[in-house]
Image (spheres, grey):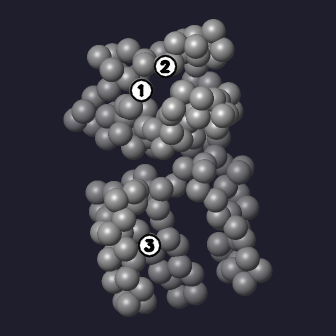
Amino acid sequence: MEVFSLILQREINREPLFQYHFGCKNLKVSHVCFADDLLVMCHGDATSEISVDKEDSWGWKNLLEIRDQIKDYVVYKIGDGNSTSLWFDNWSEIGPLFHYITYKDLYDEILTSCLKVSDMIREGEWKWPSEWHHKFPMITCLDVPAINTNIEDKIV
């Protein structure tokens, strides 16, 4: 396990696109090992896919099974907006925006699925693509979260 930890840390240091899972960045926690389980925690948004293998432990299978049942109850409160996914996390009054926006919509506007809430706010205003005001009024009319650079986003 120690060798795995060292290899994983080396790869994290080499990979500029690596993102810690929400809540793990300050402590730099990338994985947790139990007697018969290994949890690798990175990125952690709705685009991060996890498959279940028949060899997986009972506990891991159960965690993955209830994930869909509890995800609507995981709500993010915006602080600095730097760690909450604009598209996949449940931070707005209408829920995750990926329910309304497709990857094609993002592609057409040259936006990425990795954007954070703070990336679309400038000087206290949303910076939505102009065409979206007619195409997605439910999104462009969302209240702009008050960004506080001294407070990290958190799950409530």
Which residue is the site of mark 3?
A: 31
Per the image, label 2 sits on a secondary structure element best described as: loop
> Answer yes or no: do the residues labelled 3 and 1 have beta carbons within 8 Å?
no
Residue 156, x across and y down, in percent: 47, 40
Would residue 63 be found to the left or right of residue 124 on screen?
Answer: right
On screen, residue 4 above or below 67: below
Residue 134, x across and y down, in percent: 63, 9
Amino acid type shown at disc 3: His
Would residue 37 be found to the left or right of residue 126 on screen?
Answer: right
Looking at the picture, tell me which residue is in the foreground, 101 or 93: 101
Amino acid type shown at disc 1: Met
> Answer yes or no: do the residues labelled 3 and 2 have beta carbons within 8 Å?
no
Residue count near mark 1 (Cα–Cα under 10 Å), binned few <14, some 14–19, many ≥20:
some
Amino acid type shown at disc 2: Trp
Give the quadrant of residue 19: bottom left
Which residue is the site of mark 2?
A: 128
Per the image, label 1 sits on a secondary structure element best described as: helix
Q: CA distance from mark 2 to mark 1?
A: 7 Å
Which residue is the site of mark 1?
A: 120
> Answer yes or no: do the residues labelled 2 and 1 have beta carbons within 8 Å?
yes
Residue 77, x across and y down, in percent: 43, 34
Q: Which residue sits at x=50%, y=33%? A: 111
Can residue 89 be seen in the rendering of this structure?
Answer: no
Would residue 33 be found to the left or right of residue 23 on screen?
Answer: right
